[in-house]
Amino acid sequence: MNLDLNGKRAVVCGSTQGIGKASAIELALLGAHVTLVARNEEKLKAAVKELQVYSGQKHDYFVADFSEPEQLKKVSAAYAAKWPVNILVNNTGGPPGGLAIDAHPEDFIKAFASHLLCNQILAQTFTPGMKNERYGRIINIISTSVKIPIRGLGVSNTIRGAVANWSKTLSVELAPYGITVNNVLPGATMTSRLEAIIRNKAEQSGKSYDEVKEEMVREIPAGRISDAYEVAAAVAFLATPAAGYINGINVPVDGGRTGTL
């Protein structure tokens, strides 16, 4: 099985913590040059130092705020002018929780911009280089909510679904150029995002943090919440030559929780 990413360059968004950071680490272990993207430069500098360089990789970063799509367009274009990118991992923190019926229209607009529009900007920026090299991987870290909406995440469910359909459409358009587009759907993964969701549910229900967490675990056939590196392993595999014929799919990494095929 060819899992070698030596000579390939990966851009990983939201990569100073959680699944994004774990994905960057796994891609570096497979030999890729990794570029981290986030809005906090100090955290980016620290995260770059954690990436393996055993095969002589040169890792770097650029600062971008996904609440400002035009700024992202400028900095990503400047980066693409210097380096061809083979692998793009789209990963952005989810919108705040709450019922869809209670959300303001502006909440949907903000989430749509930071997720779908920013993904589109990066795809448009980096696919010319992928086409030239006849090797491209666009991997979107979304949510199992694209299969079954999650209660209390109205805006997130809506926007994640839009990203999933965008991704499927793109997979058909780009396949002739040796570019695959796939979605990784994390279930309950112990990240700061999940901790915030548990705290919010605890406050609303009057239960303790541990009680809410245990209720969540009982819904997972595997009987535990995953580690970010378990999701990152799926991201890294989809980036490799071995996954070259896997295209346009959703890959749940959820311990069997999602009740659909």
Image: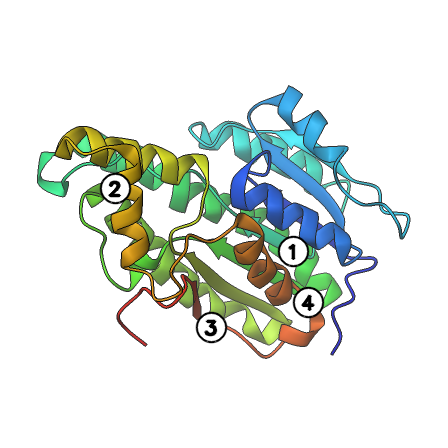
| 67 w.r.t. 232: above or below | above
Label pair 4/2, CB-CB below 8 angstroms: no
Inspect the image, locate mark 2, and give the three-letter code of the amino acid beneath it: Val
Labelled disc at residue 240? 4
**Marks 1 and 3, Cα distance to the nearest angstrom?**
17 Å
Inspect the image, locate mark 1, and give the three-letter code of the amino acid beneath it: Ile
N-term mark: 4 or 1: 1
Label pair 2/3, CB-CB below 8 angstroms: no
Inspect the image, locate mark 4, and give the three-letter code of the amino acid beneath it: Thr
Classify mark 2: helix, strand or loop: helix
What residue did someone put label 1 on? Answer: 87
Q: Looking at this view, name the residue that lies furthest to the left.
A: 101
What residue did someone put label 2 on? Answer: 212
**Nearer to us: label 1 or label 3:** 1
Inspect the image, locate mark 3, and give the three-letter code of the amino acid beneath it: Val
Classify mark 1: helix, strand or loop: strand
**Nearer to us: label 2 or label 3:** 2
N-term mark: 4 or 2: 2
Classify mark 3: helix, strand or loop: helix
Label pair 2/1, CB-CB below 8 angstroms: no
Q: Nearer the viewer, residue 207 or 52?
A: 207
Looking at the figure, which quarter contains the C terminus? bottom left
| 117 w.r.t. 39: above or below | below
Q: Which residue is drawn at the image coordinates 33% and 61% (left, top)?
A: 220
What residue did someone put label 3 on? Answer: 172
N-term mark: 2 or 1: 1
**Nearer to us: label 4 or label 2:** 2
